[in-house]
Image: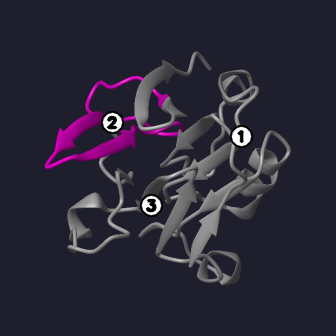
């Protein structure tokens, strides 16, 4: 499925992953004013998505730890067109294969590793917001913001304090 958003000059996207049923209170402040929230899986329960929807429209994919009827209604991957930029969302970025066609994503968003990452490879920006709910490996709990202005993409990570 491909979602498309209205045309405007600038978009702010909140990116979150690996909440595992825990949504820090500081997520609301971090995502204040975003046009869209993307959850890259391992949500934990449907209440997380309901809480995120109260902040901004939310698109989510199912992670490997998302179980139950509510989770099986979620896609395992999603392509979104924001302005002229295609974003592909998948929980485990290592399972994503870039195909050569005109709708190739400019951004691939994933979770799974619980480690924040911003990396460019062959003209594609890969973003992992880290884990908002259960960080590992000494990492802080984080989310990311993606600012899309025309063809310019800026990423910022925000540490959750609670």
Q: Is 81 contained in the magenta span? A: no
The C terminus: image quadrant? top right
Instruction: Residue under label 3, please give it.
Output: 89
- Magenta segment: does it hold 120? yes
Name the N-terminal-most of marks 1 and 2.
Answer: 1
**Residue 16 location, x and y as percent?**
54, 43
Q: Nearer the viewer, residue 57 or 47?
A: 57
Residue that numbered label 2 is attached to: 136
Among the two numbered marks 1 and 3 on one chain, the one whose residue lies closer to the N terminus: 1
Image quarter where the N terminus lies is: bottom right
Q: Residue at x 76, y 28 (%)?
A: 33
- Judging by the rendered image, the residue that carries numbered circle 1 is 35
Q: Residue at x 50, y 70 (%)?
A: 78
Q: Furthest-right residue in view? A: 54
Compared across the picture, whether 7 is left or right of 152 comes to right
Q: Secondary structure at mark 2?
A: loop
């Amino acid at each position: 499925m491909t979602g498309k958003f209205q045309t405007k000059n600038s978009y702010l996207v909140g990116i979150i992953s690996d909440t595992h049923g825990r949504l820090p209170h500081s997520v609301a402040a971090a995502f204040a004013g975003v046009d869209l929230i993307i959850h890259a899986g391992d949500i934990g329960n449907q209440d997380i998505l309901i809480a995120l929807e109260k902040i901004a429209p939310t698109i989510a994919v199912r992670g490997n730890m998302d179980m139950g009827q509510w989770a099986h209604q979620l896609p395992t991957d999603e392509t979104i067109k924001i302005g002229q930029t295609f974003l592909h969302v998948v929980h485990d970025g290592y399972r994503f294969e870039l195909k050569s066609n005109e709708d190739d994503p400019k951004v691939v968003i994933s979770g799974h590793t619980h480690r924040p990452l911003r990396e460019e490879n062959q003209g594609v920006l890969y973003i992992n917001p880290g884990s908002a709910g259960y960080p590992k490996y000494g990492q802080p709990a984080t989310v990311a913001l993606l600012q899309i202005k025309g063809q310019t993409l800026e990423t910022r990570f925000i540490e959750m304090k609670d």
